[in-house]
Image (cartoon, grey):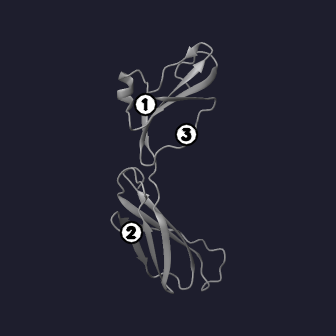
Amino acid sequence: QPARPNGIIQYYEVQYVGNETTAETDQENGFSQILSISVIRTYVYILYLIPSSTYSFRVRAVTSAGPGEFTPFISQTTRPLPPKTIQVQTKTSTSLLIEWQPPSQPHGSILQYGIRYQLLFTPNRFDDYTFYYPITLSVNSTETSVYLRGLEPYSDYQICVYTRNEVYT
């Protein structure tokens, strides 16, 4: 909601710009590179953004009396692309080797890889309603594999491999 309402809000105008141009540069150029969309809700989903890229956003309300003032720009960086070609090999009854390839276009620096794994089912326990908390590991950005040891024998695990950048750690 605007600080000083000037009639009934008809819609909101959202403007955003990617990191190829900055809000400051566009301000000098009359915002020629900024994309605008109009919405009637107080949120919007913007799709097809570039991974690991920074975008600046601002919003203003539009009433029957005309548009209000824009908010100051706020910036947000999108999530990085995930690793590709993830393979899991069983090495022993209590160990797995997880291997992956870096994203084909990381669009920025990858600081680390994250591995999250969670026990789903084990034949060694008969309490079907037990919740097993996920375990998270960090792997250096130059590594593309991890060896998990000490797992429950002959059990099912859910495994997630993801990239970490400056924003999403």
How many residues crowd around disc 2 within 10 Å: few (fewer than 14), some, or many (20 or more)?
A: some
Which of discs 1 and 3 lies nearer the camera? The answer is 3
Q: CA distance from mark 1 to mark 3?
A: 16 Å
Q: Are marks 2 and 1 in contact (CB under 8 Å)?
A: no
Q: On the picture, is 125 further left or further right than 81?
A: right
Q: CA distance from mark 2 to mark 1?
A: 38 Å
Could you tell me the amino acid type at mark 2?
Thr
Q: Residue at x 45, y 48 (%)?
A: 51
- Image height check: is 166 above or below 129? above
Could you tell me the amino acid type at mark 1?
Phe
Q: Earlier in the sequence, mark 2 or mark 1?
A: 1
Residue 67 in picture, x, y percent from top left: 55, 18
Q: Are marks 2 and 3 in contact (CB under 8 Å)?
A: no
Residue linked to disc 2? 144
Q: Residue at x 35, y 28 (%)?
A: 25
Residue linked to disc 3? 46
Residue linked to disc 1? 73
Could you tell me the amino acid type at mark 3?
Ile
Q: Residue at x 44, y 41 (%)?
A: 76
In what element is the residue under mark 3?
Answer: loop
Q: Earlier in the sequence, mark 1 or mark 3?
A: 3
